[in-house]
Image: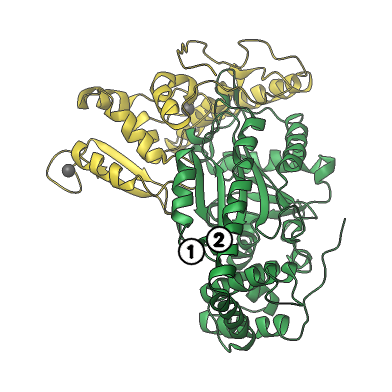
Chain colours: A yellow, B green
Amino acid sequence: MKCQHCEKPATFHITELTGGHPQELHLCEEHARQYLTQADGGEEPGGVSLASALTQHMKVGQTAEELARLDQRACPVCGITFYEFRSQGRLGCPHDYYFFAEELEPLLVTIHSETAHVGKRPRRAPTGSETRMELIRLRRAMKEAVEKEQYERASELRDEIRQLEDSHRHDAGAAAEVVEEGEGSPKKKNKRSGRKP
Amino acid sequence: MKNDVDLSKLMGQCGEWLRGSGPESDIVISSRIRLARNLADFPFIRRCTEQDRANIERTLVEKLESVSELRDALYLNVARLKSVDRQFLVERQLISREHADAQGARSVAIDAHEEFSVMVNEEDHLRIQLMKSGLDLEAAWDQINRIDDIIESQVTYAFHEQLGYLTACPTNVGTGMRVSVMLHLPALVITRQIDKVFRSLQKISLAVRGLYGEGSQAMGDFYQISNQVTLGRTEANLIQQVKEMVPLLIAYERRAREFLMRESPKDLHDRVSRAYGILCTAQTISSEETMHLLSSVRMGVNLGLIENLEIFTLNQLFIQTQPAHLQKIRGAELDTADRNIERATYLQQHLRKGNYGENPKSN
Ligand SMILES: [Zn+2]
Ligand SMILES: [Zn+2]
């Protein structure tokens, strides 16, 4: 894809969400930088413009090839690719915060200047996260099976989903436990060196 | 879900936050806190299938109805509302414009006093919001925190050990909280100091936006300031950050009003009187002009330049002269030209005859 303003390839795909209606922009690095500096004034209501944070974040030492490779990574739970997140500005599921942890960290620093939550925590332990992620994944797989007209596969999947939902409902009834360190992380592989408050 | 209830219940009343009676309510219109929450076992909204959205809506509405604070709430299936009714809810600030314009299963629960509303399937699965008249953020936090606790006892929120509450947009992650205060700042606009004030606010990472207008354009000189950061600070801290700026803004606005009263009292009085005159006598008037003139009149009342007119009446007129409200009041669909005539008539009735509407019921 070419840049909207010149002949160079577009390496920055920005969705501007400020005006109420999302607006797609495809720009080369130079025009992206230019766009950024002029867009600086009009902030998204109640937040740092996500588009500008994303673009800033992408500038930090990534070659086009690295970016292309990164863009193709897809969340195993909801299937969103990093490219889709980058262009839509919205994540696909809770697991994305684990799966794209490394990519999101500099973005969070740009937006919030911090990487650790210090506020309120749920009283109940978020138990059974593995099951929850599995549920999201299975529902997606079922939809795909239906789309491909693999009805037998789809009905198998539906049974699996029902079973999980049932067991999960029973869990939830007895889940008034105290929060344990490390619970709630489907994959505890995110290492962070963010500033602590 | 009590479905498609007509909105007449809301028509006959006015939101608590419009009472115009809270602390500093001549300048601070309202305080608002919003929390973004998501269920742990569904994708975020943009990634949901229709089936997912329907499941989320059913689950959440069922759970919300079991909450005692929400038992008497009005549940509205937003997807099935007519466009004028959705617009009506936006004008009352009970749902966001995005929620009104979106596609697919979505709803809203509104409490009887219109103090809090819970949007289901907005950008996040849950958007809980609480509004108070005047400057009253602590009370707003106490209430919304309790409602959040109760909802959380029924469902499992998406929560990350390090990052806190997980949201569809990384700009909301952590507390998921947006604290905002709506201010009426006409004198800062007249004296052309508003941009300067806002630039300094942005430097300390507070966001400013005009209310009702498109983009940053403010209609009726209403501005909303809110926190930009949601991660790495406590809720109390975020509230404090917004709250401590408010007395400064109030002081700036008061100083600008005093300046106008001192340096050009005739001009100021003239501006207020003309505005009042037009509102009382116009035969056709646009929404923009109405907001603009009501703003001058509101300041005039606060400065004692107009008597026998209550702030509460004016606060109401700001809302009731908007397009969807006029059509609901009239009970008919009206095009722009007809609305402008209807608006002029409505203003005459409520400003001229000294008929200033009912007083708000105290609870
Ligand atoms: Zn270019
Ligand atoms: Zn995902």
Q: Quadrant of the C terminus of chain B?
A: bottom right
Q: Quadrant of residue B129?
A: top right
Residue sitting farthest toward the front: B262
Residue at the spot 49% in from the left edge and 24% down from the top edge: A114
Residue B145 shows in the view: yes
The disc labelled 1 sits on which kind of residue? Thr
Q: Going from the N terminus, do you reach mark 1 or mark 2 first?
A: 1
Residue B256: image tag: 2
In the image shown, does B14 or A141 lie closer to the viewer? Answer: B14
The disc labelled 2 sits on which kind of residue? Ala
Disc 2 is attached to a residue of which chain? B
Q: CA distance from mark 1 to mark 2?
A: 7 Å
Residue at the spot 77% in from the left edge and 29% down from the top edge: B153
Classed neighbour count for the residue bearing mark 2: other residues with Cα under 10 Å, few (<14), some (14–19), many (≥20): many
- Please give left or right for residue B151 compared with residue B343 in the image: right
In the image shown, does B284 or B76 lie closer to the viewer? Answer: B284
Residue B96 shows in the view: no
The reply to whether discs 1 and 2 touch (Cβ–Cβ < 8 Å) is: yes
Q: Are marks 1 and 2 on the same chain?
A: yes
Q: In the rendered view, tell whether residue A62 sits above or below residue B24.
A: above
Residue at the spot 58% in from the left edge and 68% down from the top edge: B262
Residue B191: image tag: 1
SS at badge 1: loop
